[in-house]
Amino acid sequence: DRIERSTKKETITIAEPCLGIFGLNTPESFTKALKPESLLDGFAARFGYVLAARDPSRPMIDFPLYNLDALNRAAQAAFATLAAVPLPPVFTVPPATEVAFAQGFKMVYRGDIPEAFFRRIMFRAFKYAAIYHVLLGKDTAAIDPVDMGWAARVCAMNLADMRQIAESQGLLREALTVAARAKKMSRRWAMKGRPLTARAVQQHFRRDIDTAAAARAVVALVD
């Protein structure tokens, strides 16, 4: 919805707000806050994860100061290059690019994370592809297979790093266990002619699922 903020001099209006969050944290602190239900309720899948390992060839002791002037010049030059790329009003996805997405989808999937979690992350590839289209300086409206190929690489990196984060604390194993148990529960209820409900899931898995959102996500996983 529209966002407005009034000051003494003016009213600032944002007609179509789009929220983006960029967060930095240490893996140790982040994994303490992450719970198995975050892998089920869709919250964790709304972010892309990148683990940045320390470069062994660049020890901290060799960099006592940051050269902000040089960094700013490099950033300004890069953004100036991007600003010169004309943007079409609408990007299109030709059939060949859909085929490239499907191929990447099958290559990246390993079956070791909840399907809904995987699909939500992979659909981000279309946004990534549009970004790479601009980064590569293309002035056409059609997203091509090369753009999608780069996007699939980013999705694969997000998934691999998320696996590493989740596996380090056993979160992925716990989430998959809950999903498997819920599928068995769904089959039992179906034999009785009863649909599986989020309320029933939350009551049955009260030690593993704390929120209604996570329970609804589990139901969506087994349907």
Image (cartoon, helix red, strand yellow):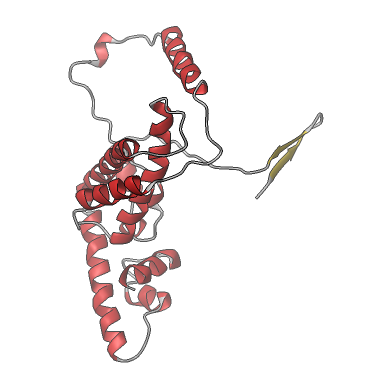
State left or right for residue 182 relative to residue 138: left
Q: Position of residue 193 (x, y in %)?
A: 34, 91
Q: Position of residue 59 (x, y in %)?
A: 22, 15
Where residue 142 appears, as percent x and y from the top left, is: 43, 39
Residue nearest the viewer, comparing 150 with 99: 99
Quarter-of-image position of residue 37: bottom left
Can residue 39 be seen here?
no
Q: Relative to 196, say whether 1 is above or below.
A: above
Q: Residue at x 42, y 37 (%)?
A: 130
The reply to whether residue 76 is visible in this rendering is yes
Residue at the (18%, 16%) spot, across then down: 57
Placement of 70 over or under 42, stated as above or below:
above
Residue positioned 38% across, 65% down in the render:
217
> 84 above or below 158?
above
Residue 97 or residue 163, whichever sits in front: 97
Q: Find residue 209 and report its horizontal and vertical position in percent.
A: 35, 66
Quick one: quadrant of the C terminus?
bottom left
How many numbered discs sit on the rendered protein?
Answer: 0
The residue furthest right is 8
Residue at horizontal 40%, vertical 8%? 67
